[in-house]
Every structure is written in C-alpha cells, then in structure tokens.
Amino acid sequence: MADIAMIAPYREMVSVAQRLAEACSVPVAVAEGNLAQGVDVARDAVNRGARVVVSRGGTALLITQAPDVCIPVVTIPFTSEELVRAVHRATRLSKTIGIIRFANTLRPDVHTLSHIFNSKIIDIPIESEEEAPRRIAEAAADGARAFVGGVTGVTYAEELGYPAILIESCSDSLSMALSEAVNVVTKTAGLQRRVQLLRRALDLVTDGIIVADSDSRVLEVSRAAEKAMGIQRRSAVGRTVDHLLKEGAPANRWAVHDSDRLGSILVLSRNGPLAKQGSHAPTASSTFADIVGSSKCIRECIRVASRYAQSDFNVLITGETGTGKELFAQSIHNASPRRAGPFVVVNCAALPESLLESELFGYASGAFTGASKSGKVGLFAQAHGGTIFLDEVSAMPISVQQRFLRVLETRAVRPIGDDRIFDIDVRVIAATNRDIRSLVASGAFLPDLFYRLDVLNLNLPPLRDRRGDIPEIAQRMLTEFGSAAPQSPRGFTEAALAILQAYDWPGNVRELRNVVQRLVVCSESECVSASEVANALGIANHLPRPIEEAGDADPDPATRNLKLSAREAELESILRVLDECGGSRTLAARRLGISRVTLWRKLRAYVSDSTR
C-alpha cells in the first residue's frame, strides 16, 4: 500500500517521478493520467489507502474538486525556470506567444518575459478543459502563432493547427512536491489517530450524527447515522450534506464557529424541530451560473456578489422590479458556507402588518384569537443555520421594523406570546426596488435598521443598461420555454433581436420573460420575426410591414415606400439591410452610408417612440 500517489499527466514525467519515488522515505505509487483519467487514478489510489495525491496543473485542480477524493492534493508547481525554457523555445516559432495555463498554476510575469525575449506574451488562464479551444482562438485572433502550456493546452493548440511547446516539470519541481507530500503524510498520521478516537466517541451516541466542513461536505458519519439513512461512511464522506439527507429526514443543525465559520454538526432525530414542522427546510435553487449575460456591468455584479458570498454580513440588494434580486440572493446563499442550510423567502409587501409579524417571529400556543393550539415556528427560526431573504423590505411597517432591528442586534427571537428567547444563526439578505435612502429621510424606514442591512450593498442594473445581454437572455428563455412545446420557434431573426434590444423594458427581465413566453405560444415561424416581436410588445401598429412579409407587398420598393411615411420607410430599410447583413450593425451602417452609432440611435428612437 503506497501512502503517496503521484499522477503524471505525460509519459516522460512518469520516468522522472519513478526515479524520485525509489529514493523516497515513504511508499510512492507513480501512474500516468491527465485530467479526468487522472481523477480516476486518484480515486483508485484512495481506495487502495493513499493518504496524499501529487499531480500538476489542470489534473491537480480536477482532483481537488472531485467530491469522492477526500485526501490532500499537493500541486507540482510550474517554476519560472521551466516557463522561461519553454517560452525561449517558442520564440523560435513566433514573436507572439500564448501561455495556456490552468488558473491554479503560476501566473507569468508577461511584462518581464516580453522584455527578455523581445516578444509579445499573452497570458491565457483557463478554469476548465472546455475553455481551452475558445481561449486559444481568442489569443490567435490577437496575433499568437505559437503556444506553451501543459498537456491540455498543447493538445488543443496543436489540434487547432498551431505549434506548441510543453512546459516540462524538472526533477527539482517533482522533488519539492514529493517532500511536501511526505510532510503531509507525517502530520496526518497523528491526526488520523485522533480521528479514530473521535469516530469511536460518535459511535457511542444513540442519535445519528453527521459532521460537515464549511463547504457542507461530510467529514464524519456516526454508526447510528449510517443505520438511520441506509448509507456507508466510505460512500458518504466527501459528499454534500444535501445529497445525503433523505426525503423527510428530520435534522437539527448547529453551526460550529471559531474566528471563521468552520462547519456544522447535524443530529438526526425523530423528535427534532423539523420533524414537528412536517416539511423540509426551504432551499435555494439558483446559482451564479444561472445568471445570463456577459456585459461588463452584470459581470461586475456577479464578481461583487461572489465576494459577498464568502462573508457572513448582511446584504442589501437594490434595483428596479424584475432585475433579478432574488436570483442574486439565492446565488449568494448557494455560494456561501451556509449553502447546506435553509433559504427562507419573505415578501414583506404581500402580507398585512399583523400577519407579517407572526410569520416572521412565530407565536406561542394561544398567543391570540385564532392562533394554532400548537403555536407556530417563525420564519427567522426556520432559517436557523441558513439565510432569510426579505424581499420588498421597504414595505415593512415601522412596528415590525422595530422588532426586526432587535432581532438583528441580539441575534435572538422571541415568538409572540412567549416568554422564552431563542438564539438564531441567520444571515439576512434584503431587497427593495424603492429609493430606501429617501424613505429613511422621510421617516418611513428606521435609520438604524437601514445601517444594519446596508453593510454590503449590491445595485442591479436595469435591462436597458445592458442591452447587449438581451439576445443571449431571450435565446436562453426561448430554449427553456420551448422545450415543452414541439412547434415552438428555435431562434430570432436579426431584425427581431434589434427590436428587442431597442425596447426600454420597464419591467426588465421579468417583462422579457413574459414576452418570450408569449412568443413561444403565438409565433408560427421557426425563427421569431420582427413583426411577431412587435405584436408581443404591443407596438405593431407603429411599425411598417416587416421585411419577413415582403413577399406579400408591392414588388416595387419605390411604390411601396410612397405608402409609408418617410420615417417608416427608413425603418423598413434599416431592418431589411440588417437581415441582409446577417445582423451585423457595422456592415449594415456601411451599406446605408451612416455610422454604426447613428444606425443604433435611429432604431432605438423609433421603438422608444412606439411605446409612448
């Protein structure tokens, strides 16, 4: 049984690794494997008792991300010497060189390399194998004619017809990584003895216990939990808690805190609070991957929100109606250490004051006339260990704001009619489509509550400020809604997309969703036409007969244009040329003898006027 598994992504590296393994103080098994194949090798090594995996580049990254490889992974570094050697060889092939690397490897100093070799050096970091062809093509468009990188980058570059130089790991790099792996083995030996002691203690407890880390991945499962859930510890460790908990399985969750959030302990019990509720804790389904758009403003919102997810502070999300405030709230929750906890949604504008208070804080048995005899667990208590999302928080009455502020200050809640106070561990994300600062100034919103909520602020842009995202969003929605309708359209004409982009969307993404749903049902074309979009937007009477129907029109353009106003004829001409140019505004503007900006301004002005 080897304590260390060294996985080499290419054959030449295997022989170097084997020589070093023979001189190592602990048993080392060396095998070849790149990317997914390397992950399979790592899984096999874990099953054979390996304590540490050593690999490099994308293979090491994938092994680290594999949920069923729950042992330390040591990454073989790309050293500056190895990189310089590869770049030097590449300069004989081209004066513009792309360095393809996975994001977990050494970031090259392109400025220094460019100066040393009197060449243009382009850094090409990738997060996954699938990105490689696209990023290589982008670098080639920027002038790169030779590439250096690991096995993945070299393979894809050569497949695309470009010469590529492999960054080869020298024996010093392998030796350095192997020494680190030996240190890990030595340290983990003592830890394993402690883990065995902990495991024996867990097995003495009658309740089922699951211990998870800050990423909600299972670290330990007691014997009682194995029996209660019908699982084995070996298959459970490394998986997320959500995947383990059965339908209806009651569980109390306690968060474990130190200076940072360390993880959680779940106790399975037939008599726990969730069992009394008789239902699952609500969860969030959306992640940042569900947010569509590549515009600078929306990518910046995602970047900022991703950073917010790593903290535990309150977040206030502002933005017009339909901009996706709940989508961002769910994404923040699912990217946070609380992802395994509940995600409770409250629409503060949808409930009257008396009902909102009892829903938020709960009530004791007989607290008021009509109250349930068994009482009610409040939404704050239901969100314990997770996140509560307060939508339209600006609509919350002052009396409820005062109680809410007290909850934020004390991190405890007292149900209506109850003398007991319950500690809660809840992160608050609030949202509003109103100018909350003006509400504070007018006295409609408590200043102290605003300051408590506005620790981290995220302002979402309206759809009209990211018009370039509209085609991608509309196509994604068309594909989603059309999957259940066999005769639904498959895409949009360029003229149709031009109208969608020119429209101001006062209802933002929610309004766009409604329009696309309408088009899925009403469109009779394989590609949605400009006239169908105009009908769906309610502006058809303001548009000239569209180019898609040109076959039914007067064959003489001059005669037909006489029947239209000069502005309508101009719009029809723009739409026709846009379609003839495949949607390229640059080519269309050139053919029309106007600038690209003027073309866009004319189209947007016409559609905007049509909605007034």
Image (tube, rainbow, N blue to C red):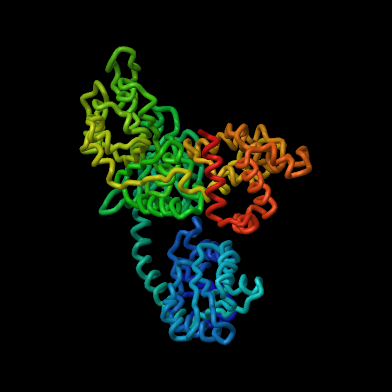
Q: Residue at x 29, y 53 (%)?
A: 260
Q: Position of residue 234 (x, y in %)?
A: 49, 53
Query: Which one is in front, 3 or 118?
Result: 118
Q: Position of residue 20 (x, y in %)?
A: 48, 82
Q: Is residue 306 above or below residue 85?
A: above
Q: Residue at x 50, y 33 (%)?
A: 612
Q: Residue at x 62, y 32 (%)?
A: 541
Residue 43 visible in rendering = yes
Quadrant of the rendered image containing residue 449: top left
Query: Which one is in front, 441 or 551?
Result: 551
Is residue 433 rendered to the left or right of residue 97?
Answer: left
Quadrant of the rendered image containing residue 342: top left
Residue 40 visible in rendering = no
Quadrant of the rendered image containing residue 423: top left
Q: Position of residue 274 (x, y in %)?
A: 39, 32
Q: Is residue 576 above or below residue 17?
A: above
Q: Residue furthest top?
A: 369
